[in-house]
Amino acid sequence: MRHPVGPLRAHRPGAGVPAGGAEAGPGPPPGDRPPDRTVSGVCHGTLGELYQGPLRPAAEPEIAVVSFPVDRHSWVYFTPRAAAGPPPHAPPLGEKSVAAARLFLDHYGLVLPPGDWRTHSELPVGVGMASSTADIVATLRCLFRVFSLPYDVDVVLGILADIERADSVFLDEFVLYLSGRHRVVRRLGPDVGFHTVFVTEPGTVDTAAVTPLLLDHYRRRGEEYRRCLTDLVKGFESGDPAAVARAATISAALSQEVLPKAVFGSLRAHRERFGADGVFVAHTGCLAGYLFASRPPAEVKSELSAFFHSLGHQCTFARGGYG
């Protein structure tokens, strides 16, 4: 796929392929007619990762992640119009979502009918919640529905690979994933889930800028990461959320050596007090919080809220994972 340039094409009556007569790409043909109602694509975000580190100890380590999905989402809506014209006042698609839409149209040899985009997101930008990838995937899911095409993970992967290093939010299960190569190494299933409480520290992280620091760290700590990942995978295989949480805590602690979170020490020191099973972070973001295999009762939630308030933060409760 080539990288997109310029605005999205307008629909022309009778047009089935892009200008210039390019052949349609692989995939099933679109529906007989564009939708006459609003369609939507939705994608969940993440609360950072349960693991981020080297796939295996190596002189040139590959960055592997087990993203931690959260019940917070990005939405993209498309409403057809009878004729082309200026759209109503609404937030446009972001630059990367526009790029993804053009790549989608180029892949299938389609043109976009006249219509209006609207977006909504619960995912803050730049803190480790996969907002950018979720926006792209929501846009693509919307386009699959615009053209009545079945959702194709391989097409999504190919488009993401042309745009950015990505999280695995396009899937509905945990996976061990090479974010730079866009490759699923191992499927870990949808059976593990957690209740969480987390906070977002101020600031953002430039992932590209810190990557060389991470790689140096992974080279130095390769064996510790290997043991951590082995334990994490065993936890998933046995369906043991407590074991997964313990491994996630180790991954978070290792991350502290290169991208520290100010609250991490307090979280770890008070974990047993609140009965939490582990601590998680956005390794290259600004999130940190607790993992609970069972829902904490209201009294514990109140205590947690007071604890985080004493650290200078408003906490948030959310369901993470799939189980």
Image (cartoon, helix red, strand yellow):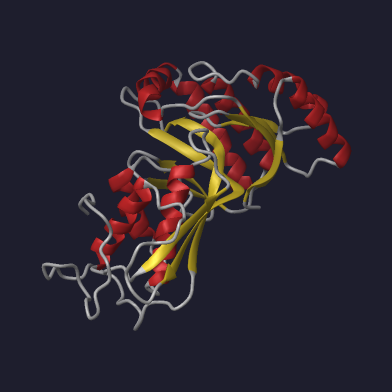
Image position, residue 149 (x, y; %): 38, 72
- Could you tell me which quadrant the N terminus lies in? bottom left
In the image, taking residue 74 as reference, residue 140 lies left or right, namely left
Find the residue positioned furthest to the bottom. 32
Image position, residue 92 (x, y; %): 41, 53
Q: Is there any visible trace of residue 186 in the rendered image?
A: no
Q: Is residue 301 above or below residue 79?
A: above
Find the residue positioned furthest to the left. 20
Image position, residue 165 (x, y; %): 36, 40
**Residue at point 35%, 81% (across, down):** 33
Q: Quadrant of residue 163?
A: top left
**Residue at point 15%, 67% (across, down):** 19
Q: Is there any visible trace of residue 272 in the rendered image?
A: yes
Find the residue positioned furthest to the right. 299
**Residue at point 39%, 48% (across, down):** 94
Q: Quadrant of residue 275?
A: top right
Q: Could you tell me how many numbered marks the image carries?
A: 0
Q: Is residue 274 above or below residue 196?
A: above
**Residue at point 63%, 38% (across, down):** 244
In the image, taking residue 128 as reference, residue 208 lies left or right, namely left
Q: Is residue 76 above or below residue 234?
A: below
Which sits in the foreground, 117 or 304? Answer: 117
Which sits in the foreground, 281 or 22? Answer: 22
Image position, residue 321 (x, y; %): 62, 47
